[in-house]
């Protein structure tokens, strides 16, 4: 079959790679893609917000399946436009995408379904927050309602920080429209887990559990980022796993189904495992980035066929390799606030072994054979192994193949979950 992927980052490179390794897939195209993935797919310079041009391309090239990677295109209704044109799509409609695109909608959904989540109130001004301060103990969590590329959540340890974040959102309008409404949310303590499922809007199959590392620095210090590294699968207590299914996944799917949402794709449930049990931090309506990078290579089967099956409305049973995987993010200097671009990358960006390789998240060629930084998260070093320790060692070994001035890398990816002790790296 002929497949088209929408997007250009590390997650989309992981999808492209998985499709290119699928026996059922004859062609992999990407809009817009990147030079870093051009060895595995044909990239096309079409705007991802131009639904008409994308529909025309799909019809002309007779694509069989479209896989939409990023949330913005899903929220904007690209899957709906393609489905209206009779195209099979892996990715939910804009109705279901509200679960990610509006934190207020998502919280109302969870409350309606009785899903455990932090208590919250909707706020629209600094005064709103000042009026409620006495009812809330610190630390405070303030979440912009709309899509903000990972920049919409403020964790504030005291009232001054909270009021400063509120002024940024409501008065300076730092996130524009996305931050005109927000949730003031109770802070939860515990450890985080990413639980992704493929779904047809009614039935679901869980993907390998993963753990992302959101903070920029080791020991979970520094600002929140899109994710600095991830490991999978996470072996968790079977009783906790059952509790996640019963109290979170089952009611989530039941409510999606009862609301009649068009959801054929992957739902990502971000969890905080607290001493009172698992609670939902957020829903995403697409593969995580970098979760996709570690989950997809663990699937034992034809990823193209699986995605096609979901696009048709079925949920196939999944089989897993008995492997572990790790992804270490190599980020640009200044990430996440202001990544420094156009810095020359030394080394071999296409180095690979049987158990490690790079995925390109934000690289660009300069036309003369040199590679430059072209985004915040630049490269993902992926390692596979028969233990988590081996997977992490392979990922860190891979990371050594490149370097550039100011490169940022967390050296403790997977340490917390590893029962095998911390790794000495680099
Ligand atoms: P979200 O986009 O809602 O998942 O938030 C991004 C990150 O902020 C999460 O992965 C957590 O690390 C943190 N976070 C979000 N909500 C809370 C909360 N209620 N309590 C503690 N940390 C939170
Ligand atoms: N890894 C976090 C996300 O994709 O939202």
Image (cartoon, rainbow, N blue to C red):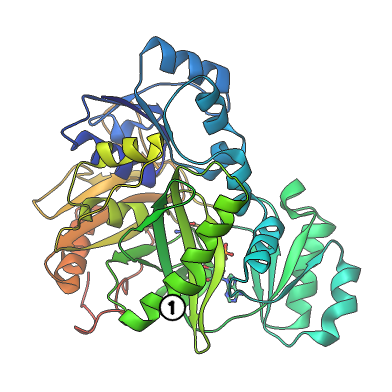
Vertical placement of 226 versus 361: above or below? below
Name the image quarter holding the C terminus: bottom left
**Residue under the point 62% across and 66% down:** 113
Q: Which quarter of the picture shows residue 230?
A: bottom left
* Residue projecting furthest to the front: 258
Residue 408 image offset from top left, x and y in percent: 39, 61
* Residue projecting furthest to the top: 60
Quadrant location of ligand 1? bottom right
Disc tally is 1
Residue 402 image offset from top left, x and y in percent: 24, 52
Q: Which quarter of the picture shows residue 211?
A: bottom left
**Residue under the point 30% across and 66% down:** 231
Q: Which of 1 and 324 is in front in this view?
A: 1
Q: Which quarter of the picture shows residue 212?
A: bottom left
- Whether residue 416 appears in this view of the structure is no
> Disc 1 beta carbon < 8 A from ligand 1?
no
Name the image quarter holding the N terminus: top left
- Whether residue 171 appears in this view of the structure is yes
Crowding at dot 1, Cα within 10 Å, few <14 / some 14-19 / many 20+, comes out as some
Residue 407 image offset from top left, x and y in percent: 37, 57
* Residue projecting furthest to the left: 354
Q: Which of 165 and 417 is in front in this view?
A: 417
Task: Give the residue number, with chain letter if any, for mark 1.
Answer: 243
**Residue under the point 20% across and 71% down:** 388
Left/right of residue 393 with respect to residue 29 in the rendered view: left
Residue 38 image offset from top left, x and y in percent: 28, 29
- Helix, strand or loop for disc 1: helix
Vertical placement of 326 versus 371: above or below? below
Left/right of residue 347 with respect to residue 207 in the rendered view: left
């Amino acid at each position: 079959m002929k497949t088209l992927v929408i997007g250009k980052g590390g997650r989309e490179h992981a999808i492209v790679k998985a499709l290119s390794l699928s026996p059922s897939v004859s062609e992999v195209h990407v809009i817009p893609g990147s030079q870093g993935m051009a060895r595995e797919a044909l990239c096309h310079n079409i705007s991802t917000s131009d639904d008409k041009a994308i529909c025309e391309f799909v019809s002309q090239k007779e694509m069989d399946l479209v896989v939409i990677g990023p949330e913005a295109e899903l929220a904007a209704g690209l899957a709906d436009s393609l489905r209206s044109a009779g195209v099979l799509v892996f990715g939910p409609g804009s109705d279901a995408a509200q679960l990610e695109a509006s934190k207020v909608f998502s919280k109302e959904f969870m409350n309606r379904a009785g899903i455990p989540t932090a208590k919250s109130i909707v706020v629209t001004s600094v005064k709103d927050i000042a009026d409620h301060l006495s009812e809330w103990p610190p630390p405070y969590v303030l979440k912009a309602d709309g899509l903000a590329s990972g920049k919409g959540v403020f964790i504030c340890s005291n009232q001054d920080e909270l009021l400063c974040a509120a002024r940024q959102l409501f008065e300076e309008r730092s996130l524009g429209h996305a931050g005109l409404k927000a949730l003031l949310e109770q802070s939860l303590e515990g450890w985080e887990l990413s639980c992704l499922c493929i779904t047809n809007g009614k039935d679901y199959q869980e993907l390998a559990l993963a753990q992302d590392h959101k903070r920029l620095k080791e020991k979970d210090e520094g600002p929140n980022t899109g994710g600095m590294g991830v490991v999978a699968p996470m072996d968790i207590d079977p009783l906790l796993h059952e509790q996640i299914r019963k109290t979170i996944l089952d009611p989530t799917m039941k409510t999606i189904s009862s609301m009649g949402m068009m959801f054929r794709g992957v739902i990502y449930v971000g969890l905080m495992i607290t001493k009172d049990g698992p609670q939902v931090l957020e829903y995403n309506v697409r593969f995580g980035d970098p979760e996709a990078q570690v989950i997809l290579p663990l699937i034992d089967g034809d990823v193209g066929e699986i995605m096609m099956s979901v696009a048709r409305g079925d949920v196939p049973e999944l089989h897993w390799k008995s492997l572990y995987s790790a992804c270490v993010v190599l980020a640009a200097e200044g990430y996440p606030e202001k990544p420094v671009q156009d810095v020359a990358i030394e080394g071999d960006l296409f180095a690979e072994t049987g158990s490690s390789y790079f995925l390109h998240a934000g690289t660009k060629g300069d036309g003369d054979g040199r590679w430059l930084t072209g985004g915040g998260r630049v490269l993902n070093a992926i390692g596979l192994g028969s233990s988590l320790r081996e997977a992490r060692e392979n990922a860190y070994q891979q990371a050594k193949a490149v370097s550039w001035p100011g490169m940022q890398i967390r050296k403790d990816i997977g340490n917390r979950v590893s029962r095998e002790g911390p790794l000495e790296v680099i």
